[in-house]
Structure formats: structure tokens, C-alpha cells
Amino acid sequence: MVTGGAGFIGSNFTRAMLKKYPDYHVVVYDKLTYAGNLDNLKDVAEDFSDRYAFVRGDITDAAMVRETIQEHDVDTIINFAAETHVDRSIMEPDAFIKTDVYGTYTLLEATRAFDLERYHQVSTDEVYGHVPEGSSKETDPIAPRSPYAASKASGDMMVHAYHVTYDLPVTITRGANNIGPYQYPEKVVPLFTTNAIDDQPLPLYGDGLQVRDYHYVLDHCEAIDLVLHEGEIGGIYNVGTGTEMANIEMTRLILKLLDKPESLIQPVRDRAGHDRRYSLDVSRICALGWEPSHTCEEAIEKTVRWYVENEWWWRPIKSGEHYQAYYRRQYEGREID
């Protein structure tokens, strides 16, 4: 059962698993919030109709979760379901606590009740907080600095506690900044790409020197697959390219790929509590034999190309009132001259 499987990473993971494992059956369980979109799985529903099922449900709904597990004879849960956007967590943290903390608890309780083979938690590098130097190891203390990061850190701690207390068979991956097909276009790379395509300003936070590891989503999916099959029970694995790039570099690269002028860059007032740098030590997962197939630059190039070629997917989202209302609330009046 792939919770949050109609979202960005979850839909890519579902597709990858069904393609790779012809004997696997996958049920996607998703609430279909603003970022959950059945168009993300349109080809999956057509190509794998005999091994794929969709259930609309909320991970905080314990009865629905358990009914789905029983009906589909689920043996493994991979939890992608989460509120994930830092900007939204600053505006409305309530939903993040409900989904990322209580929802994780609900799934863990179901895993325990049905004695499932595995529970896997998809987490984020943001739980480590700002990393001024060096790179975060899985054994480092977590120090989240946004409501989103705190909610994910809380979920991770709950997963670990259930492993220690109940001997639950769990694993955790903490991913860098994923980019790629089907990422909701309020996130920075698809936002900047689609704005640039339409010659609209690119709202860059502060001086643009925040450092991130832009990681191609299918590389992340391969890493989760490996951890599921060969990872240590109770183990945590960082996943990323192990390299980094400043946001201003990312922005200029997008503009260069689209042959657009840098005059489209519009500095805006920085995000509250904005972490300056994330950096992951990925040696532990590399020791399992995994390595990323894309550099940051290659991941950005491939992502930009997908958005250029798939306007059918993102234009209806960006023209919708939900997206437009969020965009106005987030960026109006924040311009820096």
C-alpha cells in the first residue's frame, strides 16, 4: 500500500515498482488534496489495471486504513502521505501536525495490528535543520526549524519508537530536494520553469544563496526500493546526490535551458526561518550498492524538459483558483527592489 501515491514522489514510485516487479500488486491510498492528482497515475491505471488499485482515503482515518489493508491483503506500507510544503506549513501548521504526526501514528498502529511485513517512512533532509558545515549523517541529532520539518521529525521519532517498543519492522529514508515529473508547480523548480515558459517573474527568496541538493525523483525511488529489499530493519538512510547547488545557480540554469533572460528573476522577501543549507552524507545507502544516476544539473535539465513537453498536466493546475489564491497570498507584496 502506497499512501500518498497520487502525489509527486508516490506516483513515480508506484509506476517504477509496477514496471520492475511483474508479480507485485500496488494499492494507492490517497486523500486527493490539492497536491494529489489522479492524472499523475493516468498511465498506471491503463497499463497495470490488473495489478493496481486506487482507494481514496485519509491516513488519519484508522477504520478506512484497516479496511483497505484487509480488502487488498496488504503486507507492506510505504508512507509518502504528508503535507510537505514549508511555505504552507508557516501559514497553516495545523494540517501538518494532523497528517504527518497523527497520520503516521495511525499507519503504525495498523502495521502492528495486522503484523505487516514492513512499514517504510519517507522523510526529508529538513529534519536535520540548517547545516552550516559538513554533511548530515543518519546518527546526527535532528533539529527541525519549520513546522513542516518538525512534523516530519515527529513522525520519524514515532517510527523509531514503534520499532524499539513493539519490534515493528520499519525503515526510514530521508531524501534531499526531489524534482522531476508530476511535482506540484508551487515547488521551486517546476514553479520557476513554468513561470519562465510564460515569461513571468521568478520569485527568488532573499539573496538566492540558500544551498540545496536537487535530486531526481526516480533516483530516490530506486533508493527506497533498495532499502525495502536490502536495508537494515530499524535503519535510517539518507538519499541524495551528495552534492549541492545554490538556489541562484539553479534559477540561472533553468533560464539558460529555456533561453530566457535573467531579468525574469524577481528577488522577494525571504521565508521566515529559512534554512540556509542542507547537505546529506549518503555513504550509508551507497554501501548497499546504490548511487544516483543524475547529478543536480542533470536532474534539473531533465525536469525542465518534462514540464516543457507536458503542458497538458500543469496548465490546468496553475490556472485553477486554488493555485492562484495560494500564489497571491504567498508572493504579493514581497518584492524587493
Image (tube, rainbow, N blue to C red):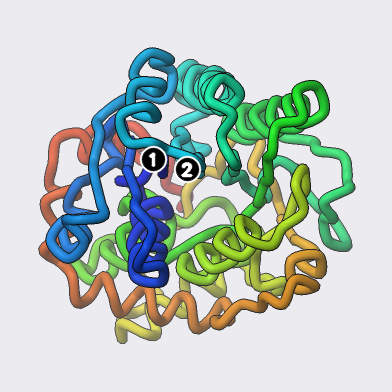
**Badges 1 and 2: C-beta atoms under 8 Å apart?**
yes
- Residues packed near mark 1 inside 10 Å, few (<14), some (14 to 19) or many (20 plus): many
User: Residue at left 80%, top 38%?
Assistant: 142
Q: What is the distance, in whole Å, between disc 1 and disc 2 at their CAs?
A: 5 Å
| Residue type marked 2 | Phe
- Lower sequence index among marks 1 and 2: 1
- Can residue 314 be seen in the rendering of this structure? no
* Mark 2, secondary structure of its residue: loop
Q: Position of residue 60 (x, y in %)?
A: 43, 18
Number of marks in the image? 2
Q: Position of residue 331 (x, y in %)?
A: 37, 41
- Residues packed near mark 2 inside 10 Å, few (<14), some (14 to 19) or many (20 plus): many
- Can residue 102 be seen in the rendering of this structure? yes
| Residue type marked 1 | Gly
Say which residue label 1 marks. 4
Vertical relation: 126 (above or below) 289:
above
Say which residue label 2 marks. 80
